[in-house]
Amino acid sequence: MQVANPAPHLYDPSDPVSANCSPISLIPDEILSHIFVVGQIPVHPTLPFDTAAVVSPQFEVLVSHVDQHWRHVALSTRSLWRRIDIIPRKTITELQTYHDRSKTCPTDIRLDHWSWKDLVPQVLIDLVMHNDRGWRQAVINISTAKHYHPFLKHLENFPIPNGPIEHLSLCVDQAESCRSHPKMQPDFIQIMKSGAPQLKFVRLRGMAPYYFRPPLTAVTTLHLELTKAITMAYPLMKSILTASPSLTNLSLYGEPIHFMTWPTQSPQTSQGMNLPQLRSLRLWGTEGWIFNVVLSHISAPRVHSLYLKEAREADLAAFWPSSHQSFPILRKLVFHECDFTEASYHTVCEAFPDITDFTVYSTSFNTPIIVELLGNPQSTPIWPNLKTLHLILNASDEQELLYDMVVARADMNLPLSKLRIGTRLPSGVLETLERQKYVEVETFAVLDQWPEGLVHLDDDDVIF
């Protein structure tokens, strides 16, 4: 690699000539610029697993104030200034500065924290709307008492056909005082009508799934969050979920589904929701109906990972007979605050016998029943192929039960490979588990992001 501006001599802190030229200042501008961009990427902090993650603010401003060299490199790195946060505490001057410094880079827009009574200054709206370079990402959280917010009006006919937008998170939350709703459009595509061929990630929450749907034909990750008391009929749900032949990750939340329009029997693949490329499915419904109804109408032969939150035994009763047919290669299962008995776990094991990775998240101080079942030599072994177990440790005395389970699995020639433990307890409390030689023990402070392999911090994944 050719190094720009090589140092005339080796760095020597005792040499007054080189004292003002530290080794880090000798890094080539191209590499330093890349370091800045990587350093700006938010990551999970080391916080308790139930604490919201915090992103260090304005990293780009900090590095631009270190010295003249760093400032020159920072100001020359256009992508470092591409995020434009339209929030009440940001000044017009600050946002204009970011806009100017990002130059030709597609921008990352975030509109948030404005109440329905507040008016976003028109100059800010113009700044991001009249942007010929396009958006790369857009996160728009709107609370409005009007039929259409100016941003939504702009999104109807997104001005750049074949634009670069890759990520859209749209939450439209009408004020409770407004009882009128915009007329539901019959067309499937309601925003970005000029096309969005690079749109891979979409989150629709609140009113957005009903009235502000973008083209979904290229989407690989879809969050559909039905948080409003507006029912969704089966044809509309099916059209949304099957719009993209490449849909890989699906997260579905909500109860307001018009079940009267759904087939009374589990339909054949041609009639149901056929999701041929789906690999990861996440589901939560506060009343439980959604589990039976939705799972029974989805055919996803390539699903590898299934995440269920607050499911109960009765919620899945109608699903079990067709479960293996619907998800024949399921290997990873996540239960978040699910209340299952021993009999239910045996049913789950019969439905999905080849699980290799199991997660149980629970805030209860009772040891999850699965720990006892996994290590019980007197009963039919639970998941003989299981290699990785993730769980939350809420009390120090639970580690003895975990230790006994690990040893029992090894004695049954069904050893685990890794035990991942989420805990607030001091590291010394896990001495018993760390002393054993059967499995690798790993601790975690925050719950894993969804979907697996997500490289950035998804601040807006707040429903689950």
Image (tube, grey):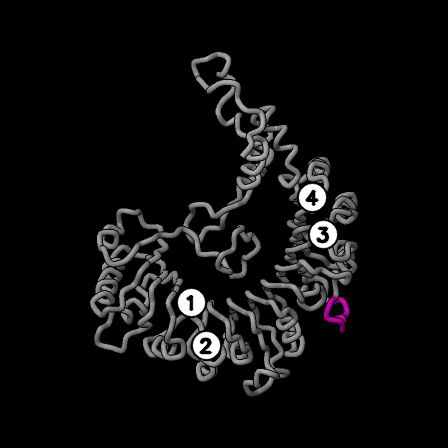
Image: magenta residue range? 182-189
Residue 175 appears in which quarter of the rendering? bottom right
Q: Amino acid at mark 3?
A: Lys
Residue hosting label 4:
105
- In this view, the residue farthest toward the top is 16
Q: Earlier in the sequence, mark 4 or mark 1?
A: 4
The single residue placed furthest to the front in the displayed view is: 2
Instruction: Give the crowd class for mark 1: few <14, some 14-19, many >=20 residues within 10 Å.
Output: many
> Residues under labels 3 and 1: Cα distance?
45 Å
Front residue of 398 and 213: 213
Given this view, does label 3 or label 4 mark the residue nearer the observer? 4
Residue 397 in view of the camera: yes
Between the C-alphas of marks 3 and 4, the distance is 33 Å
Of badges 1 and 2, the one in the foreground is: 2
Judging by the rendered image, the residue that carries numbered circle 1 is 332
Residue kind at label 1, given as amino acid type: Lys
Mark 4 and mark 2: span between their CA atoms? 44 Å
Q: Please say if 358 is above or below 312.
A: above
The disc at residue 117 is: 3
In the depicted structure, whether residue 73 falls above or below residue 354:
above
Report crowding for label 4: few under 14, some 14 to 19, many 20 or more residues within 10 A (C-alpha).
some
